[in-house]
Amino acid sequence: MRNARKLAVSGAAIVATAVVFLIPFAFILVNAMKDEQQAARLDFALPTTFRIWENLVEVVTTRNWMLLKAFLNSAILTVGSVTLLVIVSAMVGFVLQRRKTRWNGLINFLILAGLMMPPAVVPTIWLLQSLGLFATLHGLILIEVAYHMSFCILLYRAFIATIPRELDEAAIIDGAKPLDVFFRVVLPLLWPVTVTNIVVQTVSIFNDFTNPLYYAPGASNATVQLTLYNFVSQFDTAYNLLFMNILLITIPPLVVFLFFNRQIVAGMTAGAVKG
Amino acid sequence: MAGLLLKNLRKSYAQTQVIKGADLKIEHGEFVVFVGPSGCGKSTLLRMIAGLEEITGGELWIGDKLCNDAEPRERGIAMVFQNYALYPHMTVYENVGFGLKLAKTPEQVRDQMIREAARTLQMEHLLERKPSQLSGGQRQRVAIGRAIVRKPEVFLFDEPLSNLDAALRVDMRMELEKLHSALGATMIYVTHDQVEAMTLADRIVVLNAGVVQQVGTPLDLYYHPANRFVAGFIGMPKMNFLEVTAHAVEDGRVTVGGKDFATLTVQGHFGTIKVGESLTLGVRPHALRLDSAGPLAGRVQVIERMGHETNVSIELPSGGTCLAVLEGNPPIERGERLALAFQPDEAILFDANGDALNAPPVRRVQ
């Protein structure tokens, strides 16, 4: 009797989750295949004419193949930001955790402030302009790194605390210089938290709409999120093309997550951080 | 291989001095053990030699090089840690060869050296495993292998056997002795276990509260402790201490009286003792034997029968206890009245500062 009730509750939870997560996706999928008129009704009816290929071609070729350039920009932005984030945050977390100085309190405060304070957009734009980084992809990479660094540092610092200090000392005795200790001994042991950071930050940065909008305007700098604007205007929205665009730009983060999902599990269960 | 010289070595953390002027000369090839209770500074002293702690004052010489500010990799030392500190993401082969790889040793030479170290420690079959797949004893071998492969001047061991079970500890102790004989290397070993110290050391350094109490061979420390601390620390079970007063002082003999007995004569060569001076009488449990007329008498509290010997604890009239180790299996019961005696030259007298006033002869088996 108890097992049946547990099963019923689990079943209800799965159904509820499916409704919340899968139904919107199904909606997008169905409407991406319709023509403009039928899509404008915004309902769940199956397409009367299937225009998958035509919608796909139109989305990709809009504004001189802007979507392809946008994919490239998004890829550069995401890969560049995440790489910098992982390396720099891990280094900062390592030094903060291992070296106790009187500056640690102030640095901890600044990191927490970075997490809590909202970004000041206009002063940041002025700063980027004075540095000649406004409306550039590398400027945007630095913005993404700055905005996400606090979270990454906190994750890394907490995880490094679980690595025994004796491993560092053994490496030093073996002849390792500080960078050797970090890259050859500590960083490999941080794989689980590195994977977590990669997945979380990739999805967050790839899906970021506002930062590219504010800090890297211009058609040549557009990321995939901004291409959605191609199909939305004040008076006329081509919903079928909009949904097809959403479908296309959902695929990369989905692939990353599906791929790294196994890595996260493997990283957690491998477990051998204890020396 | 090199010897070491510590000249008035000091270490302070802010205002607290934890090592208070250590002077020590270690010869090349010697096996020296630092021993003492928890918090005495033995690990700190070892880490200062390794370069993992800064030296606040004094000089550290390794060979003919002043190493106060030298990086650990420049000191020619290798260390084995209590928790092994093996790199979990590397195989045994990579763990052992890590130092050589950092030193950019050619791959073929490196391979040869790793396999030679593995052969010495009988762990060739473990080379492709990761540390998580090894037992405690195997991990300890790998940690030792990582140290010996670099052929350092000095080996440092920081309580390497503490995490092993009792039986394995005895086996590994013998392995370490064999290793020392085979390599002829200078080894400095830290432990809180005085049995390890007594069995492994050429010389023992006894530390207490950051001060070197005595340096000597194991038998030296056992028979000729410099002070009450060393006398109580070395030797198991612990030495019995009785507060006494000097009644009569003659050349080669002192008569003392105490709360638990009228008078007792102790023989030996003493320093200056004044009549009426408060002293401490120390006598080892193994020196006591059953004697119905013996001066130390009381009720039996605890009997521990070990098979080949029996530990007996008696309650003295003053409320103190006296522990004796008697041979074999004597027919004594709890609550029984027992009297113990010892040879007059087997006791040690300590003055009010705790310094030993005499040195009993070293007993040799005939």
Image (tube, coloured by chain):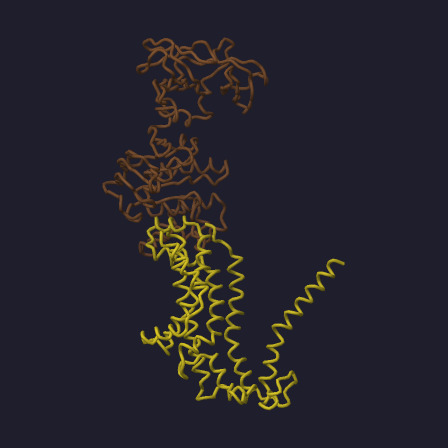
Instruction: Supply the letter of whichever chain is brown.
Output: B
Residue A15's spot in the image, x, y percent?
67, 70
Q: Which residue occupies the extreme left position in the image? A: B64
Q: Quadrant of the N terminus of chain B?
A: top left
> Which of the 4 image quadrants contains residue B53?
top left
- Residue in front for this viewpoint, B107 or A247: A247
Q: Is residue B223 above or below residue A175?
A: above
Q: Quadrant of residue B279?
A: top left
* Between B122 and A230, the one nearer to me in the picture: A230
Front-lying residue, B331 or A122: A122
Residue B23, position as x, y percentages in the image: 28, 33
The reply to whether residue B324 is visible in this rendering is no
Q: Position of residue A207 (x, y in %)?
A: 49, 74
Q: Does residue B102 show up?
A: yes
Q: Residue B85 appears at what percent x and percent y?
A: 42, 48
Task: Give the answer, above or below, for where B240 lies relative to A49.
Answer: above
Residue A227 shown left or right of residue B351 in the figure: right
**What quarter of the picture does the C terminus of chain B occupy?**
top left
Residue at position x 34%, y 76% from top?
Answer: A129
The one of A24 and B101 positioned closer to us in this rendering: A24
Q: In the rendering, what colour is chain A?
A: yellow
Residue at 47 percent of width and 79 percent of height: A224
Total labels drawn: 0
Q: Residue at x 51, y 16 (%)?
A: B316
